[in-house]
Image (cartoon, rainbow, N blue to C red):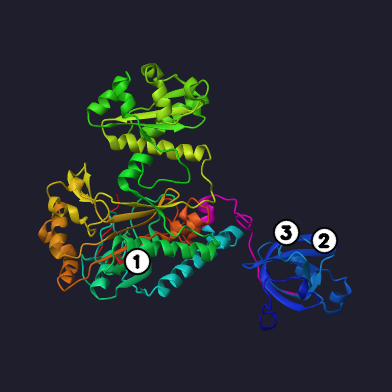
């Protein structure tokens, strides 16, 4: 190998290198035979370059090893080879301007096969055309594709840029343990049985939450970590059993300090890796505004189509179901679908079915027909109930002739908002209102601190138990938990929750009150979180933080819709790795050592 070690990569040869002898190492991407002359596209992660085997050419004939033709004949796709040769300009008509190396080719004088390849399960192309499980079974081949190479490089660049920014801002990167006491983030823990202590378990961290707070108690006032987190929940496109966060915590800060450092972090990462300038400050919406305008706490702001309050028109109109919803303290919300007047009944039913997934009982509609302004009128659906105030409705909703008005009423205002918000999101995609290259960040602030768990009939933390209730609510915490807003914030990008964070509780007494409202008895709180509340007794500083998800960030930057596309070795949608077949059974001896008995269903 020594003499056949690469002197150049497959991506770097240009016209200026003509005449030089080089050694290339890489994979046979494509091979073509043209009557005694063989063309090989040789590939590595830097690019593709053309190699020519032409033993009749004088230069080559002069130095050719006798078996060059035989070796060239044996080559198949994905053979790993070393080529020694002389770079030459391609004749003008043979140059390939679409290839960065397309002005030249390397006339081979020697080829060594470093390793042969079996028949491939799929062709290595820019984009792999195969099902997910096949791609994951052969991930090491899948990742030879140009698109995977580009995405994994982007991930490395983003991670580096994030580290660079944080370190330059005076943060320390500190590792926190992977075997811990459970940290509740609202998901199920992955557990690791202890061999030394029968019946005891470590948990894998759902996030480094408690440990980063302890670092604040320890005086490390600016912490970050590219942290692996583990949550045992059903996988989805943007979820995996293990994922990575850019975990951040700071002492002596207010909410705006955390938002600002995150905005600057994003700005640095986007500029450094995509050459995109983000606004210095991101838009902000309160949680309530987000619900009312977009029916979601993670709205996609790449398009408008805000939800409107239909209540005033419902009161004046004659449709009883709307009035009933309002009388019950609920809401009636409307959405204008631009150009929707020509939707078929079937299409409208599909949209209604979508609203029903989000618990709407139904969705009313009417079409805006006729000319512009005063000429416009309402038709179809529930229009007949609104003949007297049609003009007000059209003007108030800023609807135009040719639009479709969709209305959801519910005795629970939240359902009217959420269901119509889901229809808005669907229409945004269906109508291609979203620019796939746009990045619209928005902060959602002022979340409720508690949510009522209907199934278990108790209040629980909306984010996690350690978030700070805004000062003005401290007196009513126990009296009216549902009204309490927390110092909580989410960063949303293009309809995805990119980061969550909060200012934390640092007063042990306040922390105890929150545990108690969330139904965690003093004894249980002490057992589970005593190590944190004890730390707070020794002058713990006020602190807060946030944790942007690295996988989602890279996914969105790469224009993908699944985080699997930006993780080197992800699990499939069933939390299985088809390549190494995990999870898998273990040997009886291991179970015995762990004091475990497996009960098969
Ligand atoms: N630990 C939180 C989470 O993973 C983020 C934070 O509050 O900093 O969502």
**Closer to viewer: mark 2 or mark 3:** 3
Q: Of residues 516 and 132, which is closer to you in this image?
A: 516
At label 3, counting other C-alpha atoms closer than 10 Å, the crowd grade (few under 14, some 14-19, many 20 or more) is: few
Q: Reading the chain from its start, which is encountered first: label 1 or label 3?
A: 3
Q: Quadrant of residue 80?
A: bottom right
Is 423 part of what is drawn in magenta?
A: no
Residue plotted at (39% across, 51% down):
235
Q: Are marks 2 and 3 in contact (CB under 8 Å)?
A: no
Per the image, the residue denoted by label 1 is: 248
Q: Which residues are magenta?
A: 110-136
Q: Position of residue 184 (x, y in %)?
A: 25, 58
- How far apart in space, not on screen, are marks 1 and 2 (Cα)? 54 Å
Distance from mark 1 CB to nearest ligand 1 atom below 8 Å: yes
Q: Position of residue 414 (x, y in %)?
A: 29, 38
Q: Are marks 1 and 2 in contact (CB under 8 Å)?
A: no
As drawn, is 359 to the left or to the right of 278?
A: left
- How far apart in space, not on screen, are marks 2 and 3 (Cα)? 12 Å
Per the image, the residue denoted by label 2 is: 94
Q: Position of residue 195 (x, y in %)?
A: 26, 70
Q: Which mark identifies residue 98? A: 3
SS state under label 2? helix
């Amino acid at each position: 190998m020594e003499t056949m070690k690469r002197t150049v990569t497959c991506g770097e040869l240009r016209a200026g290198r003509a005449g030089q002898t080089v050694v290339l190492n890489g994979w046979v991407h494509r091979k073509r035979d043209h009557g005694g002359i063989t063309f090989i596209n040789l590939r590595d992660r830097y690019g593709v370059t053309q190699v020519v085997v032409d033993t009749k050419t004088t230069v080559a004939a002069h130095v050719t090893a006798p078996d060059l033709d035989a070796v060239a004949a044996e080559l198949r796709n994905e053979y790993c080879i070393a080529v020694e040769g002389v770079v030459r300009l391609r004749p003008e008509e043979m140059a390939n301007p679409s290839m960065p190396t397309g002005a030249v080719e390397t006339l081979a004088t020697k080829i060594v096969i470093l390793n042969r390849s079996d028949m491939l399960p799929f062709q290595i192309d820019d984009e792999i055309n195969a099902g997910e499980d096949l791609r994951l079974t052969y991930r090491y081949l899948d990742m030879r594709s140009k698109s995977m190479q580009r995405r994994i490089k982007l991930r490395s660049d983003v991670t580096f840029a994030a580290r660079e920014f944080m370190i330059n801002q005076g943060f320390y990167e500190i590792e926190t343990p992977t075997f811990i006491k459970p940290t509740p983030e609202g998901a199920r823990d992955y557990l690791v049985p202890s061999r030394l202590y029968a019946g005891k378990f470590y948990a894998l961290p759902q996030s480094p939450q408690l440990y980063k707070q302890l670092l604040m108690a320890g005086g490390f006032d600016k912490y970050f970590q590219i942290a692996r987190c583990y949550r045992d929940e059903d996988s989805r496109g943007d979820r995996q059993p293990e994922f990575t966060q850019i975990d951040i915590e700071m002492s002596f800060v207010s909410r705006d300090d955390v938002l600002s450092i995150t905005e600057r972090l994003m700005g640095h990462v986007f500029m450094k890796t995509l050459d995109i300038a983000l606004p210095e400050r991101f838009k902000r919406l309160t949680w309530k505004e987000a619900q009312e305008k977009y029916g979601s706490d993670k709205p996609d702001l790449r398009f408008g189509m805000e939800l409107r309050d239909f209540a005033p028109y419902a009161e004046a109109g004659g449709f009883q179901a709307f009035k009933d919803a309002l009388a019950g303290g609920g809401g009636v919300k409307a959405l204008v679908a631009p150009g929707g007047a020509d939707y078929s009944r079937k299409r409208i039913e599909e949209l209604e079915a979508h609203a029903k997934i989000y618990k709407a009982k139904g969705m009313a509609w009417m079409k805006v027909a006729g000319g512009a302004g005063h000429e416009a009128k309402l038709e179809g659906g529930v229009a007949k109930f609104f003949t007297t105030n049609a003009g007000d409705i059209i003007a108030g909703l800023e609807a135009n002739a040719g639009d479709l008005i969709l209305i959801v009423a519910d005795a629970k205002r939240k359902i009217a908002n959420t269901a119509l918000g889901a229809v808005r999101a669907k229409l945004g995609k269906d109508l291609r209102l979203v620019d796939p290259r746009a990045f619209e960040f928005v902060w959602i602030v002022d979340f409720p601190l508690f949510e009522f768990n209907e199934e278990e009939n108790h209040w629980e933390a909306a984010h996690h138990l350690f978030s700070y209730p805004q000062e003005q609510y401290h007196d009513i915490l126990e009296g009216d938990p549902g009204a309490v807003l927390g110092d909580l914030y989410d960063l949303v990008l293009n309809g995805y929750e990119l980061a969550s964070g909060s200012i934390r509780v640092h007063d042990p007494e306040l922390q105890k009150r929150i545990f108690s409202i969330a139904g965690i008895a003093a004894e249980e709180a002490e057992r589970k979180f005593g190590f944190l509340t004890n730390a707070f007794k020794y002058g713990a500083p006020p602190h807060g933080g946030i944790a942007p998800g690295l996988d989602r960030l890279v996914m969105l930057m790469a224009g993908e819709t699944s985080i699997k596309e930006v993780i080197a070795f992800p699990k499939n949608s069933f939390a299985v790795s088809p390549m190494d077949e995990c999870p898998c059974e273990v040997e009886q001896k291991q179970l015995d050592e762990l004091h475990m008995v497996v009960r098969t269903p």
